[in-house]
Amino acid sequence: RGLASAVCTELDAYSRYLGRHPGAAGTAGALALLPPGLERPASAAAQALVNWALSSLGHADQVTVPAADLLAHWSAASAADGSPKAEAELLARALERYGIGMEPDVRFGGPAPAAPTQVVLFRRAAEVTTTPGAVYAASATLIELSAAVALADGRLADAERTVIEQRVMSRAGLGEDERRRLHAHFTRVAASPPSPASLRKHVTLLPADLRQEAGDLLLAVALADGRIDRAEVTRVNRYFHAPGL
């Protein structure tokens, strides 16, 4: 009875999905809800989604693709009748079964992909992280902050990129899968930075013991390319105030 109860619990989401969509057992949405270790034959459209993602990656560790293309494959491969956030989570879980990650990912605080935007696909590590830890969440905010300062003059210099990667990506407490996601997050943020209001909100959520570190990072990024731009000074001042520095 205990075993049967555990199995029913693990299969509950999958069962309810099929209850709403009879005959959808091979769709990408249904397969995303199967517990790890269980497999069902994928529909042609579901397999096409995976093949497209793998082909887009090729031999690279990550690749930026139009969200419209990804959503078009997803729409063909699943019932796609949930809310944007629910569908985005199913999409992320569907790709995850094949060792592919995506940024943004709603499970990690990102927005649901929208047609005019870009999505970064990346290769997952052997041990996959499915929920953000405290170190990851803080690191993602530090990346957003430092990228905002680096891009104040309209470009991301190699020296600025190096500082961000060395001081954020190598933080203690991050697993390999989280580091890979942070690299993908950095790529996305550098191409499409969050709004100032959104970023200020993220900064206020930083733990108190990291706020001075955030300030030090902003100065290091502003100084990295050997010149200080007026726009960089303005942004450093703006984001110094947000955490109370």
Image (tube, rainbow, N blue to C red):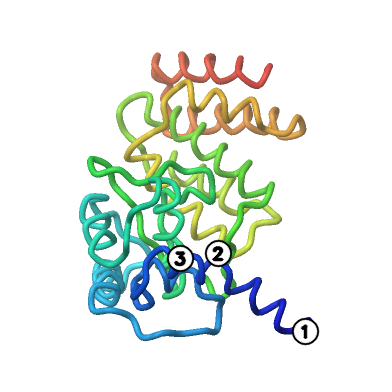
Q: Are marks 2 and 3 in contact (CB under 8 Å)?
A: no
Image position, residue 156 (x, y; %): 35, 37
Between tags 2 and 1, which lies in front?
1
Image position, residue 225 (x, y; %): 42, 33
Question: Which mark identifies residue 177?
Answer: 2
Question: What residue is shown with label 3?
Answer: 17
Between residue 129 and residue 244, name the one nearer to us: 129
- From the image, which quarter does the C terminus lie in? top right
| Type of amino acid at the residue the image marks with label 3 | Tyr
Q: Are marks 2 and 1 in contact (CB under 8 Å)?
A: no
- From the image, which quarter does the N terminus lie in? bottom right
Image position, residue 102 (x, y; %): 41, 57
| Type of amino acid at the residue the image marks with label 2 | Asp
Q: Residue at x 46, y 85 (%)?
A: 39
| Type of amino acid at the residue the image marks with label 1 | Arg
Q: CA distance from mark 3 to mark 1?
A: 24 Å
Q: Residue at x 27, y 50 (%)?
A: 67
Q: Residue at x 50, y 70 (%)?
A: 14
Of label 2 and label 3, which has the lower sequence position? 3
Between residue 117 and residue 79, name the one nearer to us: 79
Local SS, label 3: helix
Between tags 2 and 3, which lies in front?
3
| Residue 135 relative to residue 54: left or right | right
Q: CA distance from mark 2 to mark 3?
A: 29 Å
Question: What residue is shown with label 1?
Answer: 1
Q: Are marks 3 and 1 in contact (CB under 8 Å)?
A: no
Local SS, label 2: helix
Q: Residue at x 49, y 56 (%)?
A: 181
Q: Quadrant of residue 90?
A: bottom left
Of label 2 and label 1, which has the lower sequence position? 1
